[in-house]
Image: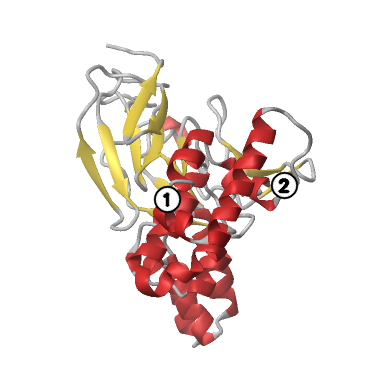
Amino acid sequence: RDACAEFLEKNLHPTNCLGMFLLSDAHQCTKLYELSWRMCLTNFQTICKTEDFLQLPKEFVVQLLSHEELETEDERMVYESAMNWINYDLNKRHCYLSELLQTVRLALLPAIYLMENVAMEELVIKQKKSKELVEEAIRCKLKILQNDGVVTSMCAKPRKTGHALFLLGGQTFMCDKLYLVDQKAKEIIPKADIPSPRKEFSACAIGCKVYITGGRGSENGVSKDVWVYDTLHEEWSKAAPMLVARFGHGSAELKHCLYVVGGHTAATGSLPASPSVSLKQVEQYDPATNKWTMVAPLREGVSNAAVVSAKLKLFAFGGTSVS
């Protein structure tokens, strides 16, 4: 059993962590239970859209949605997940509405959404207890908007942030150090060294893992290597290499895939490596398959650009171009 649990721990992923959580609970695998539960909290926006979530027993849904460390940037996602779970088997689950509504920080919903969507929801209107909960949330929301005293109701209490800040890398000197910034203790904590020292790489977080791509290593050689730091297990592993060696590039996460954008590669025949023209190539990495794919290139090559995702799109800001 221990060997099986260890294998499952190594293969935890946002797409399977909910199933792993239920499995570990049934078989009393303590470590797998803790790791999968933490991943469920961290990757709520993924698991709430799965069939596994809709089939969860009510007790687990309440435990998950009410958790203070549930990571969600928008409380609407929690409310809609609760409603989706109820509507999945409405005849049997409608009686749990008030219990599920108590897991949502209703007063943290946008005012218009709270009054036009939640308060006008047919199920809410029909159930006295649910209607009272929403009315209380509206009163709390008005007090918040009017700055009318302290609101202590649970429906207005923000969830704890579960984000962590890591420091790594640099542009001038090769570095293999990784540090965690503990904002509560106000100290910087050394973590496991990067296995291969480098500079001018890019770093991006996906769920509980930090991906570092490319960069320049020994003798300024340009790398296509990808190293992955698992924040749960606190260890490094190697992923499939990029298709193009690059440094000075940007990276971002979009729909649980990693994108690397632009940068430089080594000029042909140049030792030590010197910058080539700025790259147009954009690559996509899927952690589920451990494979890289070329996607639509930039219109113009760019290096040292800031790359970010928003509303299902990638944005590259600024940077420099060498033609």
Q: Position of residue 93 (x, y in %)?
A: 42, 71
Q: Amino acid at mark 2?
A: Ile
Element at badge 2? strand
Q: Position of residue 167 (x, y in %)?
A: 61, 38
Q: Residue at x 58, y 38 (%)?
A: 168
As displayed, is residue 41 above or below residue 199? below
- Total count of labels: 2
Q: Position of residue 16 (x, y in %)?
A: 39, 66
Disc nearer the start of the sequence (2/1): 1
Q: Is 101 or 81 nearer to us in this picture?
A: 101
**Left or right placement of residue 52 versus residue 131 in this view:** left
Q: Residue at x 44, y 66 (%)?
A: 17
Can residue 282 be spotted in the picture? yes
On residue 217, the disc is none
Quadrant position of residue 288: bottom left
**Left or right placement of residue 302 versus residue 108 in this view:** left
Question: Pointer 1: residues within 10 angstroms few (<14), some, or many (20+)?
Answer: some
Q: Is 100 or 283 nearer to us in this picture?
A: 100
Q: Amino acid at mark 1?
A: Glu
Query: Which of the two marks, 2 or 1, is nearer to us in this view?
Result: 1
Quadrant position of residue 109: top right
Mark 1 — residue?
Answer: 121
Q: Is 116 or 64 nearer to us in this picture?
A: 116
Can residue 161 be spotted in the picture? no
**Left or right placement of residue 155 versus residue 19 in this view:** right
Q: Position of residue 43 (x, y in %)?
A: 47, 54
Q: Residue at x 49, y 72 (%)?
A: 58
As displayed, is residue 134 above or below residue 278? below
